Image (cartoon, rainbow, N blue to C red):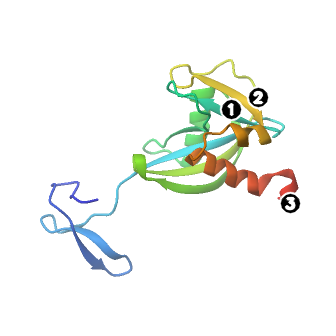
Amino acid sequence: MKYCYECGTPLTLRFLEQEGDTPYCEKCGCWRFPIFSTAVSMIVLSPDRSKILLIQQYGRPSNILVAGYVSKGESAEQTVVREVQEEIGLSVNSLCFNRSEYFAKSNTLMLNFSCTATSESLEHLNRQEVDQAAWFSWEDAEKAIRPDSLAQRFLLHFLERHRPDSGT
């Protein structure tokens, strides 16, 4: 962040105890902490947890995870439930936080969860947001996920920790 989000004045770095060098607006006399969006992405598992749901969106042929932005006043967990319902038409349970990563391209803190769908039905896809959705075995999902993507990093981390042979 280079400019004050209130007045547009260039920010300077000042030392703030317990924070280190922190952006400061001389004109407003205020510290300006970074502002970014928060979103969730989900590894949606089939009811028997043997398959992983991958989707394609916006005319792109690559497979990714279901994801969406956290709305004001909403918890990340509420967003997981809402986004899967809105995009795929499925209810989910057994939410579990996996990991997070800052995604600079969209200035977004991505929070990744796994969850279990209550059904495998894909008949209620929101076609305005999802072009295609399909269930993949764990092995096939690993091969089909978009290479060199945040979705791939989240999925690989999940698979490393939760494969039946991983001991967890």
Mark whose residue sits in front, 3 or 1 = 3
Q: Position of residue 24 (x, y in %)?
A: 23, 69
Of the residues under marks 1 and 2, which one precedes in the sequence? 1
Q: Residues within 10 Å of mark 2 (few under 14, many from 20)?
A: some
Residue 97 as seen in the image, left or right of residue 139 = left
Q: CA distance from mark 3 to mark 2?
A: 27 Å
Q: Are marks 1 and 2 in contact (CB under 8 Å)?
A: yes
Name, please, the residue furthest toward the bottom.
17
Which numbered circle lies on residue 91?
1
Q: Which one is in front in this view, the residue at disc 3 or the one at disc 2? A: 3
**Given the image, on which type of amino acid does mark 3 rest?**
Gly
Q: Position of residue 57 (x, y in %)?
A: 54, 28
Tell me the kind of residue under disc 1. Ser
Q: Is residue 32 left or right of residue 87?
A: left
In the rendered image, is residue 89 in sight? no
Left or right, residue 6 beside residue 98: left
Q: CA distance from mark 3 to mark 1?
A: 28 Å
Mark 3, residue position: 167
